[in-house]
Amino acid sequence: MSRTETSRNEISPGRLASRFARVREARQTELAEDYVELIEDLVIARGEARAADLAECFGVSPATVARAVQRLARDGLVVSEPYRAIFLTDEGRRIASISRARHRLVRDFLLALGVGTEAAESDAEGIEHHVGPETLKAFQAFLAQLQPAPSRRCKDESAPENP
């Protein structure tokens, strides 16, 4: 029996339901994370984020952005008024920071595997929302192993020259 066949036989419906629920939850938060990251980027670059800027960057209609911003405001991630700039709340900034760090970690992991820069950046954009804490820790541990050991800059004065 192949590994795939074995895995299929060992998975219980409850286990599958739990996995699919996690994926559905990740999809729900993915949009919010993408929006708060872009809003933060626009505020840093331009001093404000406008709905028109978001629509242009995401390639969606202004109505789509308006609905998303309403949800973000309802969830306490942004503050905005119609026809005014959109700003992140403290919670929105916290989510943007976490999401950005996760994105960098996934991108760096893909780069370490030899994936090209453009592909790693693009793939990280999707993967970052769907990896759990255990996987992120494994990525981090893998990358840490690739880092060269720190070298001593100065010779230890107390050590004898010739042992």
Image (cartoon, rainbow, N blue to C red):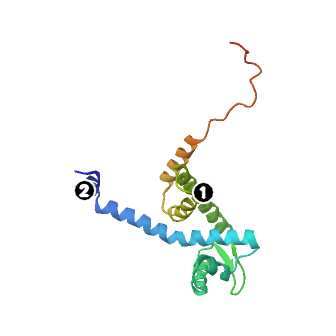
Residue wearing tag 2: 9
The kind of residue on which mark 1 rests is: Arg
- Marker disc for residue 123: none
Taking the image as shown, residue 11 lies to the left or right of residue 107, namely left
User: Which of the image's four quarters has the C terminus?
Assistant: top right
The residue that appears at 60% across and 78% down in the rendered structure is 74
Taking the image as shown, residue 60 lies to the left or right of residue 53, namely left
Q: How far across and down, in percent of the image, does residue 90 sit?
A: 68, 67
Q: Nearer the viewer, residue 145 or 96?
A: 145
Q: Quadrant of residue 148?
A: top right
Say above or below: 63 vs 160: below
Q: Quadrant of residue 150?
A: top right
Q: Nearer the viewer, residue 1 or 93?
A: 1
Q: Residue furthest top?
A: 163
Of the two numbered discs 2 and 1 in the rendering, the one whose residue sits closer to the viewer:
1
Residue wearing tag 1: 104
The residue that appears at 43% across and 64% down in the rendered structure is 22
Q: How far across and down, in percent of the image, does residue 40 sit?
A: 68, 69
Q: How far across and down, in percent of the image, does residue 154 sit?
A: 76, 28
The residue that appears at 59% across and 62% down in the rendered structure is 99
Structural distance between the alpha carbons of marks 2 and 1: 36 Å
Whichever of labels 2 and 1 marks the residue nearer the N terminus, that label is 2
Crowdedness near tag 1: few (<14), some (14–19) or many (≥20) residues, C-alpha within 10 Å: some
The kind of residue on which mark 2 rests is: Asn
Say above or below: 114 vs 91: above
Q: Nearer the viewer, residue 89 or 109?
A: 109
Q: Nearer the viewer, residue 140 or 113?
A: 113
Q: Residue furthest left?
A: 1
Q: How far across and down, in percent of the image, does residue 82 sit?
A: 68, 87
Say above or below: 117 vs 65: above
